[in-house]
């Protein structure tokens, strides 16, 4: 695993974001038969190279959505009511109809260690992030298009998918 240099990552995003989004749109519109299998292969490779604790960019720049189960679980952990939890840490996004963090970086991120203070009870959205191998991949292309700008693992996944699809053209 390699530590992530966020400055270098942001430069790479600036240079590749448009190409990667175009690539993902093409995959979405004309997916190869083995797309989900290729995503699984890329996923394994990505996690051999990615050290999330050296980054935590997702926790620094994005907000998870909190479902009612998350709110009940986390508020119980703090011995407060769900209402008090929402008032203290969350805001309701009327447009998206989601509960989200009031602040960034996330209030539960330890900025010294990049570790989540509530990791064992974190929101489901955090536990599944960056959603690289959700089935069916074509249903999550919109998420990957967004996440390439925030998550080095997603960025690497798209790099690896491009390489795999180019290499495996004859298998489609």
Image (cartoon, grey):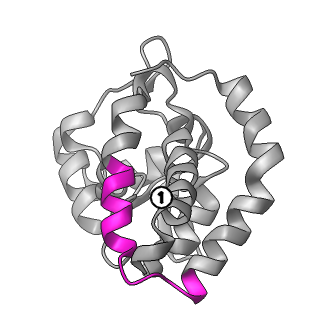
Q: Residue furthest bottom?
A: 29
Q: Where is residue 56 in the image (x, y as percent from the top left)?
A: 49, 31
Which residue lies under the disc numbered 1? Answer: 164
Residue 120 to residue 94: above or below: above
Q: Say which quadrant the C terminus sits in.
A: bottom left
Q: Is residue 144 magenta?
A: no
Picture residue at 28% right of the left edge, 44% below the top: 122
Towards the viewer: 102 or 28: 28
Q: Where is residue 67 in the image (x, y as percent from the top left)?
A: 33, 66
Left of 123 or right of it: where is 78? left
Residue 153 to residue 129: above or below: above
Where is residue 114, by image quadrant?
Answer: top left
Q: Check disc 1: other Cα within 10 Å, few if <14, some if 14-19, many if 20+.
A: some
Residue 19 to residue 150: above or below: below
Residue range of the region highlighted in magenta in the rendering = 28-43
Q: Where is residue 23 in the image (x, y as percent from the top left)?
A: 66, 69
Picture residue at 21% right of the left edge, 57% below the top: 72
Element on which disc 1 rests? helix
Where is residue 46, by image quadrant?
Answer: top left
């Amino acid at each position: 695993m390699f530590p992530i240099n966020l400055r270098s990552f942001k430069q790479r995003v600036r240079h590749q974001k448009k190409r990667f989004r175009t690539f993902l749109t093409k995959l979405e519109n004309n997916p190869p038969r083995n797309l989900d299998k290729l995503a699984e292969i890329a996923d394994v490779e990505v996690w051999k190279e990615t050290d999330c604790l050296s980054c935590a960019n997702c926790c620094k720049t994005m907000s998870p959505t909190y479902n009612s189960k998350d709110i009940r679980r986390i508020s119980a952990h703090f011995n407060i009511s769900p209402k008090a939890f929402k008032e203290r840490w969350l805001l309701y996004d009327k447009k998206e109809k989601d509960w989200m963090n009031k602040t960034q970086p996330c209030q539960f991120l330890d900025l010294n260690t990049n570790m989540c203070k509530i990791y064992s009870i974190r929101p489901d959205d955090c536990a599944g992030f960056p959603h690289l191998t959700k089935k069916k991949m074509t249903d999550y292309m919109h998420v990957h298009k967004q996440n390439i700008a925030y998550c080095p693992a997603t960025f690497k996944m798209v790099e690896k998918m491009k390489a795999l699809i180019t290499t495996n053209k004859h298998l489609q």
